[in-house]
Image: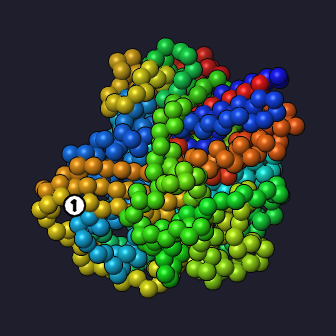
């Protein structure tokens, strides 16, 4: 079988890409979407910002053609709610983290692994995981997660002041 | 007396939350229980008191994979209640939107959820390392389906352009024509998919199913036709509640459907549609089915993967046919009459995984008084239990791990969509 996916010029944007993942109706699971909404005006002209309420497979399409991508999602690792994890899953896996989103298809970690297997992984991929507390029905964040959202917004703004792969202030020790 | 218990935390690659328990005593299968925790019950309750016009958008939220099915069953049920007839290009657009859902859903199941079972991989991620082109093919086809749903529905996950009577906005001829090249490409990919699935190895198993689907006089069924079966059932589709019933199994939160009177299971989905509508396949789908040696009635549940591929070819061909004859309807919907008295209506449409029934009673003023939604997976639930029972009976020699894998595969033959907040299916095999 030949390569069946035609190139999509609209996606082949030279701008970096920020993707906020989540479910707007599930309390802390909306944290990635909140980050994207806050960043959109702040990063105008510097980055494309997308919100994604779909499952992991959609990510493979969303980041197609992008060289530098930052994904923000709610995660569960057992840490305190609001804890921010920063990962560079260049090896194709996100060990130790379970994303709280994804009711269908693939989780973020699985999407990254699949993208790696298919050669669809962006050259520079950073994942911010915000530890979720409550993921029940609801349209507001719990206070610690709202704090985590503000932290991620600030850290991504700092990321865009540096080249990908450079040492980012406030990055802290690697989580994985 | 021998006793064995096997437990698995969850089965991946099914939609939603549930559990399977198999109890084996002295090498005899005593009980099989498929427990599904599904959300439609809540939807039925909170539809009450809402305007009938809201039902398509509210019920689309039940599922991220088959929202169009919910929109189509609800709109048709409301229109039947109100005595409306929607035809012409609006009817064609509805079929086109539904084709998008089939083109999105079938390849997802074929390549990313089901194929790993046949090729010996735990999931599509591992399969992609050895079969990257197959996985890319699945993703590319799914993308065309999503794009078609976005074009007609406004967005791919929960379309927002469907209303009782038609569409809020009908696409222009040039918008649909611009989409044509993607479908031409998709047709080639769908044909490749049929060959890919037909080349898989299948267990030699046949089940004696009562197949139930819609049947229309001249077309492969999506939204219209009678409810029929291979055992003589033939009733208008709004009579679903006359011939089927929902039973509350004590071990499950969900209701199980069965035939009224006999209490027996039945089978809905691609195998049933194909068996009962083989003569209405489009030319290429028909030829491909014959080319790969697909029997006219497929009773081997594992071969449902080929039938899904054939139906994907059908959906692409049907989408092309609709686009080629399209004239933009103006207005894009039929205005519903005022609701002056209590009225009731039911409708069945063919979700990718089988028939989806909606029944409503609307009060004067248009508020919903009663809603009943029966998803295809709850209709297949008892049949899945029967398949698993037969599988375990003939596979008792397998060790626990192999038997567990086999049970998961048998469940995935049905592409179950147990739409819920998580996607865990707990499996317990208890041997006594």
* Residue B111 in the image, given as x and y percentages of width and height: 68, 55
User: Dot 1 falls on which chain?
Assistant: B
On the image, the x and y values in percent for residue B186 come to: 61, 70
Residue nearest the viewer, comparing A77 with B98: B98
The residue that mark 1 highlights is: B343
User: Is B341 on the left-hand or right-hand side of B120?
Assistant: left
> Relative to residue B105, is residue B247 depicted above or below?
above
Q: Is residue B153 left or right of residue B137?
A: left
Residue at image x 51%, y 45%? Answer: B256
Where's the N terminus of chain B, which quadrant?
top right
| Front in this rendered view, residue A90 or B69 | B69
The residue at 67%/35% (across/down) is B31
Please state if B341 lies on the left or on the right of B425 as rendered. left
Q: How many marks?
A: 1
| View extreme (right): residue | B397
Determine the residue positioned at 57% across, 20% down. A77
Q: Is residue B97 something one can see in this rendering?
A: no
Query: Residue at 77% across / 78% down in the picture?
Result: B291
In this view, the residue farthest toward the top is A80
Q: Position of residue A34 (x, y in %)?
A: 37, 34
């Amino acid at each position: 079988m030949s390569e069946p996916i035609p190139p999509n010029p609209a996606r082949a944007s030279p701008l970096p890409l920020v993707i906020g993942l989540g479910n707007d109706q599930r309390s802390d699971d909306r944290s990635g979407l909140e980050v994207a909404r806050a960043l959109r005006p702040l990063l105008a002209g510097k980055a494309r910002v997308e919100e994604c309420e779909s499952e992991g497979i959609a990510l493979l399409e969303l980041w197609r053609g992008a060289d530098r991508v930052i994904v923000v999602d709610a995660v569960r690792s057992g840490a305190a709610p609001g804890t921010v994890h920063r990962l560079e899953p260049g090896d194709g896996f996100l060990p130790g983290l379970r994303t709280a989103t994804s009711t269908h298809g693939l989780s973020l970690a699985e999407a990254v692994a699949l993208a790696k297997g298919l050669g669809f992984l962006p050259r520079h991929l950073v994942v911010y995981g915000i530890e979720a507390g409550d993921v029940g029905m609801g349209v507001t964040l719990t206070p610690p997660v709202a704090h985590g959202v503000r932290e991620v917004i600030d850290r991504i703004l700092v990321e865009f002041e540096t080249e990908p792969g450079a040492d980012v202030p406030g990055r802290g020790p690697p989580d994985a | 007396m021998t006793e064995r218990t096997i437990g698995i935390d969850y089965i991946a690659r099914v939609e939603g939350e549930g559990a399977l328990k198999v109890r084996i005593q002295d090498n005899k299968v005593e009980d099989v229980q498929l427990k599904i925790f599904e959300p439609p019950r809540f939807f039925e309750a909170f539809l009450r008191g809402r305007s009938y016009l809201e039902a398509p958008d509210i019920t689309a939220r039940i599922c991220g994979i088959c929202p169009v099915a919910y929109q189509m069953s609800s709109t048709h049920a409301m229109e039947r209640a109100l005595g409306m007839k929607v035809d012409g290009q609006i009817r064609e657009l509805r079929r086109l939107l539904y084709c998008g859902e089939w083109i999105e859903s079938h390849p997802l199941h074929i390549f990313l959820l089901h194929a790993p079972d046949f090729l010996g991989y735990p999931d599509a991620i591992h399969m992609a390392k050895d079969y990257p082109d197959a996985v890319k093919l699945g993703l590319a086809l799914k993308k065309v389906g999503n794009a078609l749903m976005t074009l007609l529905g406004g967005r791919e996950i929960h379309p927002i352009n469907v209303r009782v009577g038609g569409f809020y906005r009908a696409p222009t001829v040039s918008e649909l024509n611009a989409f044509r090249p993607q479908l031409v490409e998709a047709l080639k990919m769908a044909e490749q998919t049929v060959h890919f699935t037909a080349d898989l190895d299948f267990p030699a198993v046949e089940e004696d199913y009562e197949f139930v689907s819609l049947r229309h006089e001249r077309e492969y069924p999506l939204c219209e036709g009678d409810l029929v079966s291979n055992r003589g059932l033939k009733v208008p589709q709004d009579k679903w509640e006359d011939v089927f019933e929902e039973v509350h199994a004590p071990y499950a939160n969900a209701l199980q459907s069965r035939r009224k009177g006999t209490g027996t299971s039945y089978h809905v989905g691609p195998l049933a549609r194909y068996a009962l509508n083989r003569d209405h396949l489009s030319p290429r789908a028909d030829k491909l089915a014959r080319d790969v040696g697909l029997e006219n009635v497929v009773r081997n549940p594992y071969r449902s993967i080929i039938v899904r591929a054939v139906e994907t070819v059908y959906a692409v061909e049907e989408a092309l046919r609709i686009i080629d004859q399209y004239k933009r309807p103006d207005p894009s919907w039929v205005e519903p009459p005022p609701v002056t008295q209590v009225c009731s209506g039911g409708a069945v449409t063919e979700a990718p995984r089988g028939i989806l029934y909606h029944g409503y009673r609307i009060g004067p003023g248009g508020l919903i008084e009663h809603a009943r939604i029966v998803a295809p997976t709850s209709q297949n639930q008892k049949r899945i239990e029967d398949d698993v029972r037969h599988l375990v009976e003939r596979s008792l020699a397998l060790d626990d791990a192999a038997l567990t894998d086999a049970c998961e595969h048998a469940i995935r033959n049905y592409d179950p969509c147990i739409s819920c907040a998580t996607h865990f299916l707990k499996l317990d095999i208890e041997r006594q």
